[in-house]
Amino acid sequence: MNQVAERPAAAQYREHDGVDMLRVRDLHAFYGESHILHGVDLEVRRGELITLLGRNGAGRSTTLKAIMSMVGRRTGSIVINGTETIAMKPHRIPRLGIGYCPEERGIFASLDVEENLLLPPTVRSGGMSLDEIYAMFPNLYERRRSQGTRLSGGEQQMLAMARILRTGAQMLLLDEITEGLAPVIVQTLGEVLLKLRDRGMTIVLVEQNFRFAAPLADRHYVMEHGRIVEEIAAAELPSKRDHLHTLLGV
Amino acid sequence: MTMIFGVPVAVFMGQLLLGLINGAFYALLSLGLAVIFGLLKIVNFAHGAMYMLGAFTTLLGMQYLGVNYWAALLLTPLVVGLGGMLVERVLLRRIAHLDHLYGLLLTFGLALIFEGSLINFFGVSGARYPTPDALQGGYQLGFMFLPKYRAWVLLAAIIVCVFTWYMIERTRLGAYLRAGTENPALMQAFGVNVPLLVTLTYGFGVALAAFAGVLAAPLYPVSPTMGSNLLIVVFAVVVIGGMGSILGAILTGLGMGLIEGLTKVYYPEAANTVIFLVMILVLLLRPAGLFGKEA
């Protein structure tokens, strides 16, 4: 029996230790009476970069929020690093080593740039130091005394990402980080993501910009109506591109 | 005799000092209200009752347990603050997801219960708390006589206000508080225990009121209604300063005390209404308050 052929496609693209960092089973999420997620199943192996693709309203952002327990109610199973979190208090979940970057960026107006950077508590040792972060995002150093919301959109996005790198989080949940940004900044963000992947970070990317996500990711999940409808490994992408475009409606 | 605009200097300065002392109490109380409103979005109508409980705890502590003034200065805010945390944990948290008006109603009801129960036991006439020995007497400054205790109240209030401002604006815990005020859900997603932060914040705001109560005990008659009389003015101060602004609460508190004092000198009939006139003026010109941010 050929061991290599049995390995999943994603692992052929890049080496992983095959351990699940995140395993979601039959996840349902509700906001009040509205039922948003209808049984999401996905898994992310340690060191993988995966994307959640789909049309607006497909439930991609809600999936990230449900993982962070930021929805009204959630049922099913979410195992992070071997720990079941479905009944866990919301503030304990990030301490399992997760950094979350919300779609609206969530920069605090009452804090300056450096206070924003230092705000999220350390969840694990081994996070990036302030110097390393400033080396990665020189703009933030220059504007460290500015009020957080005075930054440009691109700088705010850098800040929103930079502050979760300090915490020692091993898995990043990034929601629409390229939305509304100039191409040159999108390119910078792509380089940052590659650096983070090389450092062994596990990354879940919710992305509208498929051209941005395609060369970065190991695997893609496509969502529709609150469910995962398709899983595509990076290697399968060329053959499935037309099918994917139909799914995404682009 | 030296006169200022037709008023003897001693009278002028005396009223100014009285105004400043009143202002110190306004500042301490509106500061606590601002801190609580910032994170809990609740207008804490029980704040006057907490101030009153601070004074009463001090009085009863001395009468029944022999706790002296200096120990009370530390213990009373602690005891009343813990009581506040209990109120938040047991009552306010249950209605946190509802319209904030319910919080206002609940705290208003609590204030009535506290006041009513104490009136039942002690009546409304009030009792005197002796000025501590070390703060008897005063200083003859030449142009006026400065009682030691009043100087101490002013000093203590300013120290506590500056300390609170520093804690909130310059420390990490304060950054949690400011950020939690803006976006509590995201703070949870960073791993901050927001429910605990809310409990501590309410406890701290209440402790500030209780501290003001201890300072007030030797100055004013300690009675169950002492808080509700003061609170109406303090609400006006908060509206003038702008809800949720820390520095605004402190400066407006002191400033309004001064304005009240000056009015007593020149037009005593308006002394009780001048703050409300200022409030109307501020609401017309800057609806968010002098230090508030426009929504």
Image: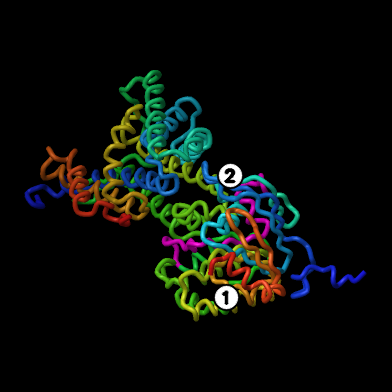
Secondary structure under the numbered disc 2 in the rendered image: strand
Name the residue rendered at 79%, 68% in the picture: A8
Q: Amino acid at mark 2?
A: Arg
Q: Main structural element of the magenta stretch: helix, strand or loop?
A: loop
Res A73 label: 2
Residue A250 in the image: above or below residue B256:
below
Q: Identify the residue at the far right of this view.
A: A1
Lower position in the chain sequence, tag 1 or tag 2: 2
**CA separation in Å, label 1 and label 2:** 34 Å
User: Disc 2 is attached to a residue of which chain?
Assistant: A
Could you say which is closer to the camera, residue A62 or residue A139?
A62
Could you say which is closer to the camera, residue B229 or residue B102?
B102
- Range shown magenta: A85-112
Res A126 visible? no
A103 drawn magenta: yes
Secondary structure under the numbered disc 1 in the rendered image: helix
Left or right, residue A41 beside residue A17: left
Q: Amino acid at mark 1?
A: Arg
Left or right, residue A248 beside residue A152: right
Which color scheme does this rendered protein use? Answer: rainbow
Res A211 label: 1
Locate residue A20, reporting x and y percent.
75, 60
Could you say which is closer to the camera, residue B42 or residue B67?
B42
Could you say which is closer to the camera, residue B63 or residue B270?
B270
B276 drawn magenta: no
User: Disc 1 is attached to a residue of which chain?
Assistant: A
